[in-house]
Each structure stands twice: as structure tokens, then as C-alpha cells.
Amino acid sequence: MEKRAFGKTGLQVSVLGFGGAGIGLAQASQGVVDRMLGEALDSGLNVIDTAECYGSEELIGNAVFGRRQQCYLFTKCGHSSGFDLESWDPELIEPTIDRSLRRMRTDYLDLVQLHTCGEDVLRRGDVISALQRARDAGKTRFIGYSGDGEAARYAVESGAFDALQTSVSIADQEAITLTLPLARRHGLGVIAKRPIANAAWKREERPGYAEGEYWDRLKVLDYDFLRDSDDERAVEIALRFTLAAPGVHTAIVGTTNPDHWRQNISMVQSPGVKYDFQAIRERWQKVADTIWVGQG
């Protein structure tokens, strides 16, 4: 699988990464996770991204135990899940990272990210300092911010972070102009989340949360490649669009279906379908509403 230099970190990351939200929310079995991550590592994938609030750290830690040197473990912190502290309390950062280390059965993490906190929290600086102390103590090699919009822009411009995780897809293109150029100039590694827009176009009825927002947007965008019956081709075009966005190093896709995961791996390893990146950008620029901001 193709590898890209992850900004100034020196890491060589696979263009496709595994996102751990889905397996946690669905309470996937350890056996399913073992098989998916085993196949992913065998195929050359080396990025596994999760968060302390997803409920998947333990599943991932068990699945990659014994293969730690073959992958980069990324997680996120900041929420008070399981602790008697307010979210974004700087005293929360160290214990959540320590818990992530135990759950993932490792003595260090490759990247710990602040998880979608607002610009006001970032500007106070105390949670950033707490994360930097964890890096200085060797608990994580690098630190990052996961989020969108003006908060993400501030995080990049602050110079405090090594990486940015942000939404980039056919239905979520704010970052392509707002933060990706800045991230490139600052040498940040960039992780694209929601790279296939949750495949929202497959739903007959409007789903909830960010998928619903994407469903609405895609109705307006009305891309021609979403009109035919070949869903696999549509997914591949969506994924390749995200990976072609200047500044993106890896795109994380989450699934609980091993068949979907095999298809994703096959897509990025194949020569690829023909599509027009610029046509997708131009369609967005023509019809996108100014309120179509990045979805966290």
C-alpha cells in the first residue's frame, strides 16, 4: 500500500487508515476486529486511529498486540468519559492518556489528539500544555488536533501541533481552502476523517447526525457519479477525491463489515477508476452553501 511522509513527523503512513469509531459504537466482537486489523496489517496498512471515548481502544490493543511495530496507534483525549472531571479539564489529559496506554497494551502512542475542543479551549492553552507534557514524558511521540473550522485553523496557526485530523470529502470541502494549505506550510501531518462522507448517498431516508447533513448536501450537489447503480465505483471516487486533496496524507475509514474493509483496501491498491477531481471541486464551489462548514 502506498505510503506518504506524514508532515514533519518523519512517519511514513499508509494512505488508507483504520478508524475505530464504528467498531466501538457497534460493540464489535474481538474476533471480527482481530480479522479486520490482521488483514489490514497484512495488506500494508499502518495507521489505526481511535479515541478514548469510542469504546474501541481495548479491541484494537488486543488485535495488534504482538504486531505493535507494524502500526502507528493514534488516539484522542479530552472527554470526561469515565472520570469525575469536566471535559477539557487539563487535569484530565494525563489520566486519560494513561488509560489509553493500558487499554491499547502499549507503553507509548504515536499520536494523541485533542478531540474537537473549541477555539476558546485552545486559546486558554492549558490543555495544550498538558498534552505537550505527555509528549515530553514519552507517552506519545507526537500531538495533534482533531476538528474543523476556525478551531482547526487556530490549532494549525498556533504552531503547537504535529498533526491535524479534519473532515475532507465530496460533501465536506471547507478544509481544502481553510486549513489544508496552512497545514502544508506548517509541516503538519494531515488525517482526513469521514473521507467517503459516511456513504450517505446510499440511504433512502435521511439519517441522523453528520450523515444527515451530508445526505442533504449530496442531494444539492447531485454529482453525476452518484446517479448510477454502481455503489462501489462511487465509493472509490469519493475515497480517491479525498486522497487527492493537496495536503492529505492518510484517510481513515471505519467499518464493522470485513467485506467492506477488503473492498476499501482493494480500491487504494488498484490503478483506480477515472474521475475528474477538478469537476468535483467546481461543483462544490458553484452550489455549496456558505453554512456548509466542516462536520466534527
Image (cartoon, grey):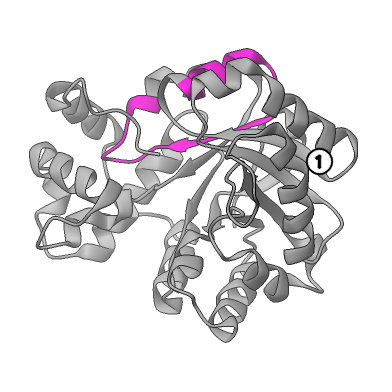
Give the mark count.
Answer: 1
Camera sees residue 42:
no
Tell me the residue that label 1 is attached to.
141
Q: Is residue 157 above or below residue 254?
A: above
The foreground one among 173 and 148 is: 148
Q: Is residue 211 above or below residue 261?
A: above
Residue 25: x and y in percent read 45, 66
Residue at the location (50% across, 20% down)?
119
Residue 191: x and y in percent read 54, 40
Q: Is residue 31 above or below residue 81?
A: below
Does the stretch in magenta take in 160?
A: yes
Toward the bottom, the furthest residue is 31
Q: Which residues are magenta?
A: 151-175
Residue 276: x and y in percent read 26, 38
The foreground one among 113 and 42 is: 113
Residue at the location (88% across, 33% down)?
136
Amino acid residing under circle 1: Arg
Question: Where is residue 287, by image quadrant?
Answer: top left
Quadrant position of the C terminus in the picture: top left
Q: Is residue 78 above or below residue 259?
A: above
